[in-house]
Amino acid sequence: MSGIRILIWLSATLAVICAAGLYSVNTLIHQKKIIKEETLSNLVPSFTLTAHTGEKISNESLRGYVWIAGFFFTKCQGICPLLEENMKTIQEAFRNQGKVKILLFSVDPKNDTRERLAQFAKKIGALDGKWYFIFGKQGEVTELSRKGFLLGATEVPGEILHSDRFVLVDERGFIRGYYKGTEEAEIQKLIEDTKNLLRGEKP
């Protein structure tokens, strides 16, 4: 009888230990998830720039929206046309989703004036209130690209360079992913990850 009691006691003890262990693991996973969300170093810094519509666009005005950012300039004949076409694909995917915004930042402040960007937006078929073409003073956008989005960019005369990456940003202003803007598979992944964010899921 005592042997059975010992066996029952050992079984009960083991069950408690296993339950406690699982609880601890789940707690650690939950805490890790919270820490990861609350201590992200990829928060887009404060900025205020102007869109082709004349509106002031800032990190604060974008709060509450899921947004996708990229860099370009209107005279670019390299990767920009493909980037723009792929942004049109993204725009179409979220045409009726008001919580999604698209931003293309110009790295050519000398030529890409508000008027030029407005003409370009109309030419490419950018939807009002959905897709914004952003410009700033010399150095503002490249600074945001390098230090804010951790992407390369330069405004050296005769050598305007920028990244081919699109950046996904969540409602709180945290960067959630980088995607090669010239590859169809990456664009589809970006679209799916954006949908996940809209559903409250992490990419």
Image: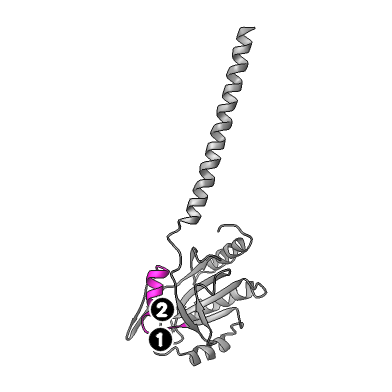
Task: Give how far across and how far down residue 42 sits, in percent.
Answer: 44, 62
Query: Badge 1: how crowded within 10 Å, few (<14), some, or many (20+)?
Result: some
Amino acid on which disc 1 is placed:
Pro
What kind of element bears circle 2?
A: helix
Task: Give how far across and how far down residue 105 sits, in percent.
Answer: 46, 79
- Residue at 40% x, 86% y is 109
90, above or below 27, in the image? below
Query: Badge 2: how crowded within 10 Å, few (<14), some, or many (20+)?
Result: many
Please report whichever mark, 1 or 2, sits nearer to the chain's N-terminal start.
1
Residue 60, visible in the rendered structure: yes
Q: Are marks 1 and 2 in contact (CB under 8 Å)?
A: yes
Quarter occupied by residue 72: bottom left
Which of the labelled discs sits on residue 134, or is there none?
Answer: none
**Distance (Cα) linking label 1 and label 2:** 9 Å
What kind of element bears circle 1?
A: loop
Quadrant housing the C terminus:
bottom right
Which of the labelled discs sits on residue 109, or is there none?
Answer: 1
Q: Magenta includes 193? A: no
Q: Which residue is mark 2?
A: 141
Q: Nearer the viewer, residue 203 or 185?
A: 203
Task: Give how far across and how far down residue 80 sits, in percent.
Answer: 47, 80
- The single residue placed furthest to the top in the displayed view is 1
- Residue at 39% x, 79% y is 140
106, above or below 99, in the image? below
Task: Give how far across and how far down residue 55 sits, in percent.
Answer: 53, 84
Q: Magenta includes 141? A: yes
18, above or below 3, in the image? below
Amino acid on which disc 2 is placed:
Val
Which portion, as a residue range, is magenta?
Answer: 135-150
Q: Is residue 58 left or right of residue 11?
A: left
Quarter occupied by residue 141: bottom left
